[in-house]
Amino acid sequence: MRVAVVDDSAADRAWLAGELEALLARRGLEGTVTAFSEGGDFLEAARAERFGLAFLDVYMEGMDGVETARALREFDPGCLLVFSTSSEDHALEGYRVHAAQYLVKPYGAEEREAL
C-alpha cells in the first residue's frame, strides 16, 4: 500500500509519517509512506503512481487540502482520503470529495487505527 502524508508543517508531517509506518509494521502490512509539503507535488506523484491512502492537511500554503482532494478526484476516485487538520470548519467539504475520515488535530492512535 502506498500512503501519502500531505502537510505543510514539517513537524506534523514527520510525526504522522512515523506513526503510519509504525502502524503498517504492527499490522504486518507491506507499504510505503511518502511525505509531501504541498498539494502540487503530491498530485504529480499520484498521477505517476496511485496512492491507496492519503492524509491531507486542509490549511496549507498555495493549494489547500480541499483543492488538492478535488484535483485528485478528477483522475483517482479510489484513493482513500483522510483530512488531518486543526479545524472542523471544512468537514462538509470532506464529504463532497468522499473522504473516508476527517480528523481534528491533535488526535491519537485510536482515531488513526480505526481506519
Image (spheres, rainbow, N blue to C red):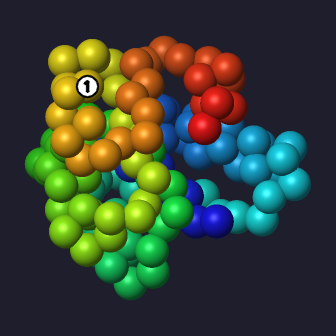
Q: Residue drawn 26% across and 36% down?
A: 94
Binning the other alpha carbons within 10 Å of mark 1 as few (below 14), some (14 to 19) or many (20 upward) gives some
**Residue 83 or 98: which is nearer the viewer?**
98
Please give left or right for residue 12 compared with residue 6 in the image.
right
**Quadrant location of residue 103?**
top left
Specify whether residue 34 is in view: no
Please give left or right for residue 105 compared with residue 58 in the image.
right
Q: Residue drawn 32% across and 70% down?
A: 76
Furthest-bottom residue in this view? 48
- Residue 83: x percent and y percent? 37, 36
Dot 1: element: helix
Mark 1: which amino acid?
Ala
Please give left or right for residue 51 compared with residue 94 in the image.
right
Q: Residue drawn 27% across and 17% down?
A: 87
Specify whether residue 101 is in view: yes
Q: Residue drawn 45% across and 74% down?
A: 50
Q: Quadrant of the N terminus?
A: bottom right
Q: Quadrant of the C terminus?
A: top right
Find disc 1 in the rendering and name its residue: 91
Q: Is residue 59 above or below residue 61?
A: above
Q: Is residue 96 above or below residue 3?
A: above
- Residue 4: x percent and y percent? 48, 56
- Residue 39: x percent and y percent? 26, 56
**Residue 38 or 80: which is nearer the viewer?**
80
**Quadrant location of residue 86?**
top left
- Residue 22: x percent and y percent? 77, 43
Please give left or right for residue 60 compared with residue 85 in the image.
left
Say how many tags the image has. 1
